[in-house]
Amino acid sequence: MGYMMETMAHIQRDKKKLLTRVRRIAGQVAALEQALQSGDDCDAVLVQIAAAKGAMHGLMLEVMAGHLSEHVVAEPDPAKRAAEAELLLELLKRHAR
């Protein structure tokens, strides 16, 4: 349980800021849905998709930065640090697709 609390420390500390980002993303996805529902031109739909994707990318980078700072850079145990770095690399590979 101690590890779980440690892994969530930056999430809990930044919860308000992260939730603001998530709500912005929800608004962008709602705008995308509305654009599709109302039959907007494809250029307007593409703009909405790009905005939502950019917002998700920003959220991912922010959470990854917190993870890197707290669970890789500040981790005193070399084995845990290596495991956390590997996890981060796998997430980056998936995110880059």
Image: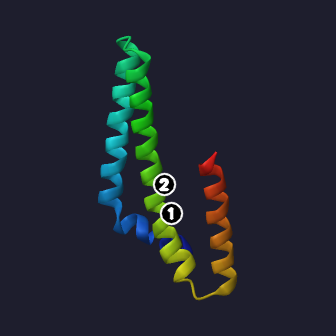
Relative vertical location of residue 29 with respect to residue 6 in this rendering, above or below:
above
Tell me, yes or no, whether the two marked residues, 1 and 2, touch with CB atoms within 8 Å.
Answer: yes
What x and y, as percent, mark residue 37? 38, 14
Residue 20 % position (x, y): 30, 50
Residue under the image location 43 percent in, 44 percent down: 54
**Residue sitting at the far top:** 39
Which residue is located at x 44 percent, y 18 percent? 42
**Does residue 97 lie above or below 43 as drawn?**
below
User: Is 46 on the left or on the right of 68, as rendered?
Assistant: left
Give, as a three-letter code, the residue at label 2: Met
| Dot 2 crowding, Cα within 10 Å, few <14, some 14–19, many 20+ | some
Distance in Å between CA atoms under marks 1 and 2: 6 Å
Label of residue 64 in the image: 1
Image quadrant in which the C terminus is located = top right
Residue 37 higher or lower than 51, as above or below: above
Name which residue type carries label 1. Met
Residue extending farthest bottom = 76
Q: Which mark is residue 30?
A: none
Give me the residue at 68% from left, 68% from top.
Answer: 86
Q: How many marks?
A: 2
* Left or right of residue 5, residue 34 in this image: left
The spot of residue 30 in percent (x, y) is 35, 29
Q: Which mark is residue 60?
A: 2
Quadrant of the frame with the N terminus: bottom right
Residue beneath the point at 62% across and 57% down: 91
